[in-house]
Amino acid sequence: MLEKSGSTTGGLPPATSARSGSKPSASASDGPEPEEDDDSSAGVAVCQTLPCIRIEHFEQSIQHSVSNSEYSIIAMAGRVRHPIDVKSLEAYLNKNVPEIKTPLDIKQFGFGQSNPTYQLTSPTGTRYVLRKKPPGKLVSKTAHKVEREYRILAALAGTDVAVPRTFCLCEDDAVIGTPFYVMEFLDGRIIEDAAIPGVSPRERADMWADSVRTLAKLHRVDPRAVGLETFGRPSGFYARQVNTWKTICAAQSATRDVETGEPVGDLPHFQEMMAFFSDAAKQPRDRGTLIHGDYKIDNLVFHKTEPRVIGILDWEMSTIGHPLSDLSNHITPYFTAHMGSTIHNAHPGFKPGATPGLPDADEVAALYCRTAGWGTASDPDRWPDMARELRWAQAFNIFRQAAICQGIAARVAARQASSEQARRYGDARAALAEYAWELVQAAENTGGSSADKPRL
């Protein structure tokens, strides 16, 4: 598999861990636990410590590499850090999945991740991926749901959505200690930098276009047609998200520094933003589709030589929810590019004209609309009230990032996190909240935006 070598994220480890479905995960802060099979993309899971929610995947999701155009073939699976009972696993596979030949060579994919993920290599050289829950007692009932990942991957197998093939789900703890599933290994490119360096402008444009088409194809799938009608609630996604984050932010803001006694405090414009987001009349039209929950370039596997997506990875936050939550997450780099050093993940390559071949945010939205079939007969590239709805969704997306950084600040205050990296994330909350407020105001008006920002 091809992976970018090196990173320019100020000493942070690369976010990719080359695999057919796993990435480092991180936690941030605290709050109410979501209902089973409902709004998992909120990424919220209760920690049994201070008011601190756990946000799966966020810290690595905001580690965007800024500029590196060299790729190299590297080994992305290495020593096993979480041992498993290999003989028991082989016996299970021999009985239940005879297609997978044994004995197996087993390695573990790099860096820490929410769900330990292994590369299995058969005597024929065929590679597979095993993904399991972590060992020990889990603090959350909703995190680490490998059964949920398997369910959506298996359900999408008969659709035009690019997903790895699944072979089995084992829910018997006696086999290797926790539930696990096995899927195919996708041999392609995982690109950590969303600006896709190291390719021609034409290929960059084609790769971004296929990432958008791939997302729209996912959102076109009828959950009932693939047996996923109970995968989440079919309506009210944003209303529930707003209520959840309102509660979370209240707990986080009240957290006091263990040494100074100073509270973390509210995000700038918090009350005004909550009033705006809570107004049902201003929210996007209510929709319910299958959503990935963390859709972005580095959660995709591209073909080795062709500009097309061959697989979507990291499904543990998937649910039924509002499709604009996925689209707004995917185009976040366009919106934060102008923020420079004020936040940790501003990518200058997404400033207008900075990277040849990158589509602009309006072009992304138009292609998404056309592929998803949301447009009108007279204008297939736009749906009614498209600009306002996208501005609302992006404003909420940036607000949510600010709230997550506030949660990291709460962990720092409670000394549950002490690294300089954590402090940087926490310190970004004010700038993100100010920008979210700016987007809220843009969503309430029909006027344009400044020249260096997306025109949505």
Image: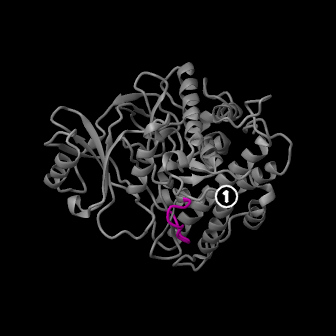
Quarter holding the C terminus?
A: top right
Residue 114 seen in this snapshot? no
Relative depth, front residue between 223 and 119: 223
Q: In terms of image quadrants, where is residue 334?
A: top right
Whole-percent x and y of residue 66? 53, 38
Name the residue: 21% across, 56% down: 83
Whole-percent x and y of residue 326? 59, 46
Relative depth, front residue between 258 and 435: 435
Relative depth, front residue between 367 and 148: 148
Whole-percent x and y of residue 311? 44, 36
Mark 1 is surrounded, within 10 Å at the Cα level, by few (under 14), some (14 to 19) or many (20 or more) other residues, namely many
Residue 41 seen in this snapshot? yes
Q: Residue 83, relative to residue 155: is it above or below?
A: below
Name the residue: 59% across, 37% down: 216
Name the residue: 32% across, 39% down: 184
Q: Which residues make up the magenta segment?
A: 28-39
Relative depth, front residue between 306 and 13: 306
The residue carrying mark 1 is 238
Quarter holding the N terminus?
A: top left
Main SS category, magenta section: loop
Mark 1 is on which residue type?
Tyr
Q: Is residue 38 magenta?
A: yes
Q: Secondary structure at mark 1?
A: helix
